Amino acid sequence: MKQNENLSTNLCSICPRQCKIDRLNVKGFCGETQNIKIAKVIKNFKWEEPCISGDKGALAIFFSGCNLRCDYCQNYEISRGGVGQAYTIDDFCRLIEENQNNHSCIDLVTPTHFSKELALAFEKINKKIPVVWNTNSYETEENIAFISNFVDVFLADLKYCDDKLGKEFSKCNDYFSKALSALKLMCKLKTDVMDGNFMKQGVVIRHLVLPDHIKNSIQVLNVINDNFPKRKVSIMSQFTPNGKSQLNRKLRPIEYKAVVTHLENLEISNGYIQDFDSASECYVPKF
Ligand code: SF4
């Protein structure tokens, strides 16, 4: 696999944060060195969209750390808390090879900051099921092109269209422009290929509706409709306050209804709407 020049240097520029530090021993904004660290592996995970979970469920691998670190993160302990276990590349290969036959897909959750190590691992793995890149979409185009060699499905967020929200909640000034460019490239690289209701290759665009920010969700749907009209869309209602953010309440039914009504008005019908009941803590995996 040929690495992009930016990705082959020791100074990390994997994501738009562009920390430019040597992650051999130093942690970047993502909170991790270059060594793969995994907070949790959940086998036969059925909480992703049905086209991702498939019949057997996903082999869901939750990586420690995160390059976006939203203050309302639904998995705060793993994105910020530093929990997790170190895996060598060979350990990771073994994890996949010993489990892939019993699963529908390999679901790599928030993997961006380990892109280089995962690319090395998948050079060695005899992959038999699709690899899902479950990303916040704060990605560079270079990294998307690089990892698309071993990734089959992008399960990709579009969180904000308003950069003020990116700054407020995720400490970045350019979330929207970076995520939009990354999503455009994902869609260019991966046409949707379905096997019945199961996605073997393609893109699913996700959006978590935030309390008090319905206007943002309406704008997100407009952007999806304008730029990605044929792609699957997943609108999530499961927001659960983590006690660390000013977003300190659950979504109200009337807020979610306004977003779903806009989705219907745009006639976006290819995708998923979560039941409102999903906004409970039992929907958030414990770590
Ligand atoms: S992956 Fe981590 S260290 Fe590298 S640029 Fe992004 S936040 Fe910084």
Image: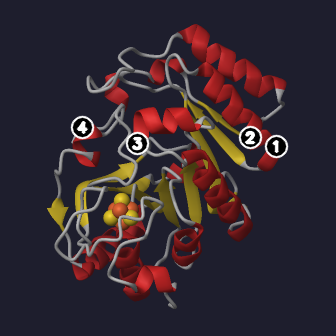
Crowding at dot 2, Cα within 10 Å, few <14 / some 14-19 / many 20+, comes out as: some
Which residue bears the numbered disc 2? Answer: 223
Amino acid at dot 1: Asp
Please tell me which of labels 4 and 1 falls first in the chain. 1
- Residue 256 visible from this viewpoint: yes
Please tell me which of labels 3 and 1 falls first in the chain. 3
How many numbered badges does the structure rendering display? Answer: 4
Crowding at dot 1, Cα within 10 Å, few <14 / some 14-19 / many 20+, comes out as: few
Which residue bears the numbered disc 1? Answer: 226
The residue tagged with tag 1: helix, strand or loop? helix
Which residue bears the numbered disc 4? Answer: 286
Point out the residue furthest to the bottom here.
Answer: 2
Q: Is residue 14 above or below residue 179?
A: below
Left or right: 186 as drawn, with respect to 251: right
Which residue bears the numbered disc 3? Answer: 171
Left or right: 267 as drawn, with respect to 262: right
Q: Nearer the viewer, mark 4 or mark 1?
A: 1
Q: Nearer the viewer, mark 4 or mark 2?
A: 2
Q: As rendered, which of 62 and 139 lies closer to the eye?
A: 139
Mark 2 touches mark 1? (CB < 8 Å): yes
Amino acid at dot 2: Val
Please tell me which of labels 4 and 2 falls first in the chain. 2
Amino acid at dot 3: Lys
Q: CA distance from mark 3 to mark 4?
A: 25 Å
Left or right: 170 as drawn, with respect to 31: right
| Residue appearing at x 24%, y 45% in the figure | 80
- Residue 229 visible from this viewpoint: no
Crowding at dot 4, Cα within 10 Å, few <14 / some 14-19 / many 20+, comes out as: few
